[in-house]
Image: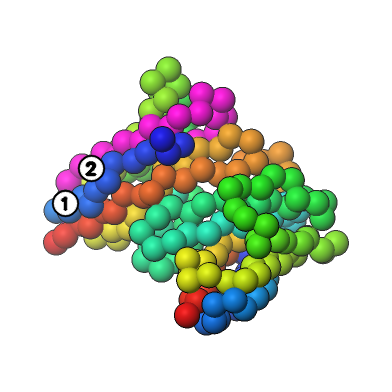
Amino acid sequence: DAGVTQSPTHLIKTRGQQVTLRCSPKSGHDTVSWYQQALGQGPQFIFQYYEEEERQRGNFPDRFSGHQFPNYSSELNVNALLLGDSALYLCASSLIGQNEAFFGQGTRLTVV
Amino acid sequence: RKEVEQDPGPFNVPEGATVAFNCTYSNSASQSFFWYRQDCRKEPKLLMSVYSSGNEDGRFTAQLNRASQYISLLIRDSKLSDSATYLCVVNAGYALNFGKGTSLLVTP
């Protein structure tokens, strides 16, 4: 049973560029959430997707957008990258109505 | 004020010691509570859920005090493999709100 998988694992981008991160949820899960974890901090909630709709959004600018596909996989897009966007981006999947969330290994984004 | 606040740590303890982590949360409407463990440069993994009645899983005991909005985690008989960052997590709505984490280093 595959867990949550994310790609790529590492990425280096230049300021101003755009990036797309991908996530496949754990088998049987229908809800995907994205988190940003800066060095030395706890993960911060970006948004959650369910039934291909953004269900809730954290305190992140519109440069951060996402999508969920019919197979429940998801993408996180970040436009106009800033140095401060450098972080570990984590995807978590869960089943609607259940609290337990499982995290992928994350994508480590470095903006230079 | 942050939604979830934890002991800053780090905690350095010898093998076999008992160590306690504390956490407070600000949203009284919070419904679910967890402790996650995160190893260096890895993803967070659920250690245990926390219930009002308190719950135990082997060497780990978690307690929740809703009136004080306080959560604790007790680790008994610490092992070297317990070295990690422990994240206090509170769920209110759809988002998980994480504390900053407390680092634990268990030494021989």
Q: Is residue A105 magenta?
A: no
Which quarter of the picture shows residue B20?
Answer: top left
- Quick one: label 1 or label 2, which is nearer the N terminus? 1
Mark 1: give few (<14), some (14-19) or many (20+) Cα within 10 Å.
some
Q: Is residue B18 magenta?
A: yes
In-image side of A62 versus B21 (left or right): right
**Do dots 1 and 2 share one subunit?**
yes
Task: Name above or below for residue A7 compared with residue B47.
Answer: below
Residue identifier under label 1: B13
Which quarter of the picture shows residue A89?
Answer: bottom right
Label 2 chain ID: B
At label 2, the amino acid type is Val
Task: Name above or below for residue A50 compared with residue B5.
Answer: below
- Quarter of the image for the C terminus of chain B: give it: bottom left
Q: SS at mark 1? A: strand
Q: Looking at this view, is B36 or A44 the one in front?
A: A44
Mark 2: give few (<14), some (14-19) or many (20+) Cα within 10 Å.
some
Task: Name above or below for residue B19 compared with residue A9.
Answer: above
Contact between marks 1 and 2 (CB within 8 A): the answer is yes
Q: Looking at this view, is B90 or A37 the one in front?
A: A37
Q: Is residue A44 visible?
A: yes
At label 1, the amino acid type is Val
Give me the residue at 55% from left, 81% from top: A13
Give me the residue at 62% from left, 71% from top: A80
Spot occupied by residue B73 in the image (x, y as percentages of width and height): 34, 38
Part of the protein shown in magenta: B15-35
Spot occupied by residue B89 in the image (x, y as percentages of width and height): 47, 42
In-image side of B61 versus A111 (left or right): left
In-image side of B85 versus A95 (left or right): left
Residue identifier under label 2: B19
Spot occupied by residue B51 in the image (x, y as percentages of width and height): 48, 29
In the displayed image of the protein, which residue is found farthest to the top? B67
